[in-house]
Image (spheres, helix red, strand yellow):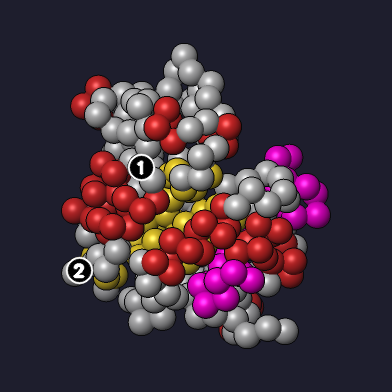
Amino acid sequence: MSKRIPLLPGRDRPLLFAHRGLSADAPENTMAAFRLARSEGIPGIELDIHLSSDGAIIVFHDDDTSRLCPGTAMKIEDSKSADLRRLDIGSWKDSRFCDQRMPVLAEVLEELKGELYIDIEIKGRSTHDIGLEAALADLLADFRLDASSVCVSSFNPIILRRFKILAPGIPTAIIYCDSEELPRYLRHGEGRWIAAADYLKPKSSELSLGRTRLGHSLGLRPVVPWTVDQPEEAAALLKAGCVGLVSNQPNRLGLSLSNGGIQ
């Protein structure tokens, strides 16, 4: 078994990630949502990336623009970054956010590195290599980011494995849930072995607290569940041994935040 890379060593536990930024209060995956997480004292953010047709690493969750930009249906991987970045991706949340555009990952890292730790989720339904993993590995190297400040996750174990080969020092997680959108053989975290993942990101509602306690006591892979929005659930998961949480509203979980860390 290959040696696992520690997840954000030196960071206060439990880890806490604002899901797509502080997405309960600002439009997801926008600079507004990331800045709001920072201003609320949340120590980490989670975001999603795709590769545009001209090779830009775009921060956006969906495969296309239809949900967040009503009246459009641009597929991210088939579109040029300049065209994507003209779109208003904030007004669906509130007219106050009409100025929000799709960030590129370099823009996020430039502003937030050194302040927040970041979970970068690589999107991709295919096993075909379009160059996203290599582009991400190069960008993280350019910014001199390591296991103390960034981690990478994906539902797709082939994508994750490819990234691990290119950036072996960055901790990675397999994401999973019991969804028909996933092949049956990947719905319970089986992709951890294909990807050589360092930690696990299950959907919180499908997590067995008993198994989590056992895994924690045996020193198995750390667990960071998503998406945890209720204080009672957060408390139970942390008591069971989860090392962190991903939440749409991490500022409402009843955790005491101080100086970017959790007390």
In the rendered image, the vertical position of residue 28 relative to residue 139, given as above or below: above
Left or right of 13? Residue 62 is: right
Magenta-colored span: 164-187
Residue furthest to the top:
71
Left or right of 30? Residue 156 is: right
Whether residue 237 is visible = no
At numbered mark 2, what does the secondary structure look like: helix, strand or loop?
A: strand
Q: If the image is split into quadrants, where does the C terminus sit?
A: bottom left
Image quadrant where residue 88 sits: top left
> Circle 2: is it few (<14), some (14-19), or many (20+) Cα within 10 Å?
few
Please tell me whether mark 2 or mark 1 is closer to you in this view. 1
At numbered mark 1, what does the secondary structure look like: helix, strand or loop?
A: loop
- Amino acid type, residue under disc 1 in the picture: Pro
Q: Position of residue 33 (x, y in %)?
A: 30, 44
Q: Residue shown at 43%/50% (left/top)? A: 47
Front residue of this view, candidates 167 and 100: 167
- Amino acid type, residue under disc 2 in the picture: Ser
Q: Residue shown at 36%/53% (left/top)? A: 106
The residue carrying mark 2 is: 258
Mark 2 or mark 1, earlier in chain: 1
Q: Residue shown at 48%/63% (left/top)? A: 138
Whether residue 86 is visible = yes
Front residue of this view, candidates 56 and 221: 56
Q: Position of residue 8 (x, y in %)?
A: 42, 75
Residue furthest to the right:
185
Q: Residue shown at 48%/18% (left/top)? A: 72
How far is mark 2 from mark 1, CA to CA?
Answer: 28 Å
In the rendered image, the vertical position of residue 198 relative to residue 1, given as above or below: above
Q: Could you say which disc has been placed on residue 103 in the image? A: 1
Q: Position of residue 187 (x, y in %)?
A: 73, 53
Front residue of this view, candidates 151 and 254: 151
